[in-house]
Image (spheres, rainbow, N blue to C red):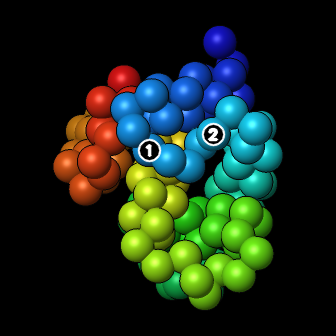
């Protein structure tokens, strides 16, 4: 299974676990935006020594910018966007210790496996 298919499958599990964001109609678009944003981070970032958490926050902001008509109005839904970004990162750039991928901060962690 390639990265794209694994991301779509993780989004399906995330939605089944209760996350309102990766609805079927938006999964492909979210994946496309997420891959582009993840791959361009180093070129776009001005952070001297970025961490994985910096990348995940940037990814969440990018997904919000792509999907929301007015990103300033996202409010508490931002946590779900961050969860979506953490799930994406765990699939495309797994780390040996899942805690480093943000496990525990997302209410839908079981969707990552």
How many numbered marks have been drawn onto this rendered protein structure?
Answer: 2
Residue 97 visible? yes
Tell me if I can see residue 92 in this picture: no
Left or right for 39, reference 53:
right
Residue drawn at (76%, 66%) of the image: 66
Give the vertical position of 47 relative to 59 (above or below): below
Above or below residue 39? Residue 31 is: above
Name the residue at 73% across, 43% down: 26
Circle 1 crowding by C-alpha within 10 Å: few under 14, some 14–19, many from 20: many
Quadrant including the C terminus: top left
- In space, the residues marked 2 and 1 are separated at their CA atoms by 9 Å
Mark 2: which secondary structure?
loop
Residue receiving disc 2: 23
**Mark number displayed over residue 19:** 1
Task: Report the quarter where the N terminus lies.
Answer: top right
- Front-lying residue, 108 or 50: 108
| Residue 53 drawn above or below residue 74 | above
**What is the quadrant of residue 80 in the picture?**
bottom left
Query: Where does the image place residue 75, in percent across and percent down from the top left?
Result: 46, 79
Q: Is residue 42 above or below residue 49?
A: above
Q: What element carries label 1?
A: loop
Residue 54, position as x, y percentages in the image = 46, 71
Q: Quadrant of residue 28?
A: top right
């Amino acid at each position: 299974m390639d990265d794209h298919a694994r991301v779509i499958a993780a989004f399906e599990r995330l939605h089944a676990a209760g996350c309102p964001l990766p609805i079927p109609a938006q999964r492909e678009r979210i994946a496309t935006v997420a891959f582009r944003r993840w791959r361009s981070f180093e070129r776009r970032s001005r952070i001297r020594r970025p961490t994985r958490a910096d990348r995940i926050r940037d990814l969440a902001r990018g997904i919000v910018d792509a999907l929301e008509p007015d990103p300033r109005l996202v409010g508490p839904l931002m946590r779900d966007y961050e969860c979506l970004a953490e799930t994406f990162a765990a699939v495309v750039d797994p780390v040996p210790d899942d805690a480093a991928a943000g496990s525990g901060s997302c209410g839908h962690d079981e969707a990552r496996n």
